[in-house]
Image (cartoon, rainbow, N blue to C red):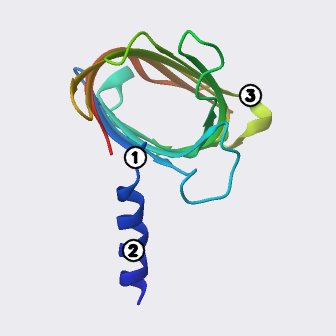
Amino acid sequence: MKNILLGSVVASTLLFANNSAQININNDTVEIGGEVYLNNHYNVNDSSNYYFIVNFLNTEGYDDYSSQSLITTGFKVLNPYTDDNGISLGLGIKSVYSNENDYLFFSTPLSAFVKYELDERIYFDAEFSYAPRVLSFSDAEEYQDLKFKANYKVLEDGYAFIGFRNIETKYENGAEMKYDDSVFVGYEVKF
């Protein structure tokens, strides 16, 4: 019965547009993620777009560590167009988890999003997330990330992109880990 219920939820999610899955890479980092559009499933305000987000990032050999991983889940809300020029603004909250080198990192950063649609083929988006000490738990003291992307539509529901990201964590004992600070390329599918 659980398998039937789970399969029904997954199938119904895939039938509606505005969901997405992406993968991006650079020399030593891979990130896999997705967004589930919640407006079709819940009775929410139609003037905003609500998303559930999930990401997994793994980096190899950065800052002299053999391998580091971050798992992120959260929610974001985007206003479809705040003006006639294709600019969308949004806010969100997410949870970030990592358990590397005997340190347990858990934080709940607040996020700000901006998206600018140049035309139907090209759009730019940016995200900034920050968690001060009061939103950081376990061994964590602070978290911040910054991401910019330029996206180009190559297929009906597919976008190739290039971007830059910076992800940093700070721990209570003074240790700092930089998960990534570089350019990446990737592909996103919307369904």
Badge 1 is on which residue?
17
CB contact under 8 Å: marks 2 and 1: no
Does residue 189 sit above or below 130 in this rendering? below
Badge 2 is on which residue?
8
Foreground residue, 176 or 77? 77
Does residue 58 sit above or below 166 in this rendering? below
Quadrant of the rendering where the C terminus is positioned: top left
**C-alpha distance separating marks 2 and 3:** 39 Å
Query: Given this view, does label 2 or label 1 mark the residue nearer the observer?
Result: 1
Expressed as whole percent of the image width and height from the top left, the position of residue 151 reads: 33, 18
Quadrant of the rendering where the N terminus is positioned: bottom left
Query: Given this view, does label 3 or label 1 mark the residue nearer the observer?
Result: 1
Expressed as whole percent of the image width and height from the top left, the position of residue 12 reads: 40, 65
Residue, far left: 155
SS class, disc 1: loop
**C-alpha distance separating marks 3 and 1:** 35 Å
- Residue 119, numbered label: none
Q: Could you tell me the amino acid type at mark 2?
A: Ser
* Side of 171 where 56 appears, left or right: left
Badge 3 is on which residue?
132
Residue drawn at point x = 39 percent, y = 74 percent = 8
Residue, far front: 84
- Of the two numbered discs 3 and 1 on the same chain, state the one appearing first in sequence: 1
